[in-house]
Amino acid sequence: MAMEKLERFYDKSRLPLTISKQEARLYMTFIYVAFISLAIGGLMGLLQTLVRSGTITLPWGIDYYQILTLHGVILALIMTTYFIIGFQHALMGKTVGMSDKQRKTAWIGFWVMVLGTTFAAITILLGRANVLYTFYAPLKAHPLFYIGLALVIIGSWIAAFVNWHQVYKWKKEHPGEKTPLLAFMVVINMAMWFIASLGVAVAVLVQFIPWSLGYAETINVLVSRTLFWYFGHPLVYFWLLPAYMAWYAIIPKIIGGKIFSDSLARLAFVLLLFFSIPVGFHHQLTEPGIDPTWKFIQVVLTFMVVIPSLMTAFSMFATFEITGRKKGFGGLFGWLKHLPWKDVRFLAPFIGMLAFIPGGAGGIINASHQMNAVVHNTIWVTGHFHITVATTVILTFFGIAYWLIPHLTGRTLTPAINRLGIIQTIIWTVGMTIMSGAMHIQGLLGGPRRSSYSEYGGTEQATEWIWYQAAQAIGGTILFIGIILMVYIVIKLAFFAPKGNEEFPIAEEEENAEPTPKFFDNYKLWVAITIALILFAYTIPFVDIIQNSPPGSPPFDWPIGNS
Ligand code: HAS
């Protein structure tokens, strides 16, 4: 029996591995929570654009910041984390296998996350945690909110340990073989996530929980914000990297091509691990109390983290062009014609890639020290993250869902659902272009982020912004229609599509590809370099902050406002 099991996991001739029913149930449960979160969070988003434009006022005394918190927490923290962990578990199950013990441990991680999510949700719904997804001090929430978030993180760490253990076991059975590309990527993403989330865990356990329980009278605001952004920037790459996994290793298969370069893909991930953490100060460029030299150093490191994304862009273009030319499409741009535009598994992620061109340019503007002064705390930043996480990443996740869900539920993506998916992708693109575009422009005109109409309605500036706010409400409404359609598609794929066998597309390397250097599997080296870079970028300024930052906030709840 044990031998049989081993074969199911490790028999190379049967790669990629088959996913058992029990495994599929685990992976799908994460995906279900993700899409339920999308529905709730999307509704909150619609309400926000309507409130900001002055179209509606919220009934029953509901606070603007309550729905803003729910929107941010449920989409940015909950939806993403559940989808990513579900997807990554599926990738690991397919490439290196998941044993019964590992599956049971992964379930523990899931339930810990659910417990934490429930705690956080209760406090937000009761209006006891109107602190937004960044929960900046001195905004104070009910202790259960912080405990809930800590549990979500602990649950995700359990998933990380399971993933690392899967590769460890696989490597023991396959001495001398390189870790399969997708498994390598998952290991790197979870290493980044673990190292980064230590920062927010410390802030929550050492600062926020004692403070909100009343054991500590004050809180050091600058320390808490620094710990948050130590985590906050890698958080955005924790969202991005699973999208890159699909771009590098799944999209080539869907378009009928091969992986452009296994080594380049691994190098991009290693560079993202190195440079995504020691850059948090670029979110704090306007904050006093941090030495400008260290802000400058972290700005330089931010420009380093752009490089692996440029490598990714290069790699994608190369994959598209090489595949097209192999199929006989010539000319400078003739190869564009071969791309499967009518296949939603390709179209949705491709539009995500396109969106990342202005999204990445916006990020470079944000990171450019002086220009940050123009856009910081304006709604430009909100426009930036809607075009990155809510378009590039989410459209890629939707693209994954079209094949992953039917694969796991034993159904098929029918031409009719594919057509609906294409309509959904177009709706999303139109809605986001209008909404995010208007946010960028209003931001340049000085429009603040995180402010409700009641705070600036009737002022001269509000008259200037009115068209952009109306555009955001229109874009938001279109997006909400997109969300309803997506939820409908997910339900169809999970429960009603015809039974069948949907492909789990994993691309292969070119037959004559150069072998990937062995040193890529030296995880300890990558983690050691990452830690060294973090220590370099943070030790001196952090000690300086602790020694010299002003005393903590007063021991009472500050009024909620723009932070
Ligand atoms: Fe950002 C703020 C800088 C990327 C998300 N960012 C945010 C916030 C979020 C966020 C959520 O330096 C707000 C946080 C808050 O609430 O306060 N960001 C950057 C930089 C990058 C970047 C330098 N951000 C992202 C990604 C996100 C994300 C990715 C989510 C997933 N961001 C900042 C800064 C701030 C900030 C400051 C603080 C602003 C402030 O003052 O508050 C870079 O990683 C971007 C590099 C990307 C590229 C693009 C490469 C293009 C590719 C696509 C190729 C296309 C193809 C298809 C192949 C260089 C890979 C084309 C095919 C054809 C045929 C045409």
Image: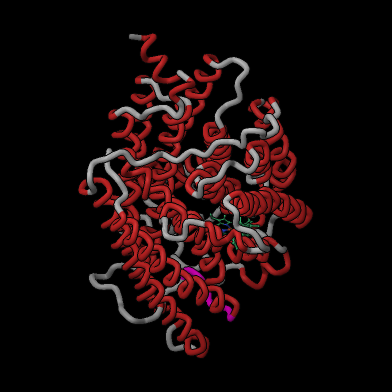
Residue ID at (46%, 75%): 434
Asked whether residue 34 appears in the rendered view, the answer is: yes
Q: Per the image, is 325 magenta?
A: no
| Colour scheme | secondary structure
Q: Which residues are magenta?
A: 445-450
114 is higher (above) or lower (below) than 520:
below
Quarter of the image holding residue 185?
top right
Number of labels in the image equals 0
Of 289 and 394, the residue lying toward us? 394
Q: Residue at x 55, y 58 (%)?
A: 353
Using the image, determine if residue 133 lies above or below residue 428. above
Q: Is residue 171 left or right of residue 129?
A: right
Residue 62, position as x, y percentages in the image = 29, 67
- Name the chief secondary structure element in magenta: loop
Residue 541: x and y, percent? 72, 47
Let me know if residue 158 appears in the view. no
Q: Position of residue 319 (x, y in %)?
A: 61, 49
Residue closer to the observer: 532 or 265 = 265
The quadrant where residue 489 appears: bottom left
